[in-house]
Image: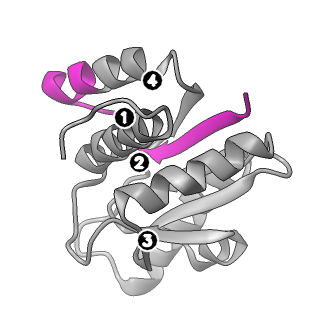
Amino acid sequence: MALVRIIAVGKLKENYLKQAEAEYLKRLASYLKLEIKEIPDLPVPENASPAQEEQVKNGEGALIDNLILPKSYLVVLDIEGKQLTSMELARFLHERQVTAQDLTLVIGGSLGLVESIKAKANLRLSFSKLTFPHQLFRIMLLEQLYRACKINRGEKYHK
């Protein structure tokens, strides 16, 4: 089974998010070899200029780049990315497993992702045109991976 690595900017702070993550990691353990790598949410100066914000994104991008698995299929979560149905996501995950190709999924921080990381992506994936808090989105991603695994095994999961 190929490795699925989630690279996430920032730590989960609220207990309810930590509990949700722990629950999904427990559920996913029988389906995937999954790991989460966190990088620090770099501080953004108050009233930051666009140049300062870009500098923060560049710093986070360098940390993310160091954690991208070699030869892995790189997916960045991006509001401007392609949207998939749950069935399409399940097929996509199945293809990675069949080819034994590692999968790296990247969730940016509060400022988003630097263009250099987006440019490396094999897929820019969007869950919605809405903006979500990156900590909450991490749980949403885990839930969708779990749903995809259940679909791929032909198991029931609520719609």
Measured as percent of width and height from the top left, residue 151 is found at: 41, 40
Q: Which mark is residue 41?
A: 2
Q: From the viewer's perspective, is residue 143 above or below residue 26?
A: below
Q: Secondary structure at mark 1?
A: loop
The image quarter containing residue 132 is bottom left
**Position of 15 relative to 57 (above/below):** above
N-terminal of the two: label 4 or label 2?
Answer: 4
Report how far apart the C-alphas of labels 3 and 2 lie in the structure.
17 Å
State the separation of the CA atoms marked 1 and 3: 19 Å
Tell me where residue 63 appears, x and y as whole percent. 64, 50
What's under tag 1, amino acid-wise? Lys
The residue at which mark 3 appears reads as: 78
Who's the residue at 72% across and 71% down the image? 120
Camera-near label (1 vs 2) is 1
Q: Which mark is residue 124?
A: none
Cα–Cα gap, marks 3 and 4: 23 Å
Q: Residue at x 25, y 78 (%)?
A: 129
Front position in the image: 73 or 44: 73
Q: Earlier in the sequence, mark 1 or mark 2?
A: 1
Do labels 1 and 2 touch, CB within 8 Å? yes
- 157 sits to left or right of 34: left
Q: Residue at x 35, y 45 (%)?
A: 144
Q: Is residue 133 left or right of residue 51?
A: left
Question: Rounded to the nearest whole Å, what is the CA distance between mark 1 and mark 2?
Answer: 8 Å
Q: Amino acid at mark 3?
A: Asp
Residue 24 or residue 10, whichever sits in front: 24
Q: Amino acid at mark 2?
A: Asp
Q: Which residues are magenta?
A: 1-20
Location of mark 1 (residue): 11
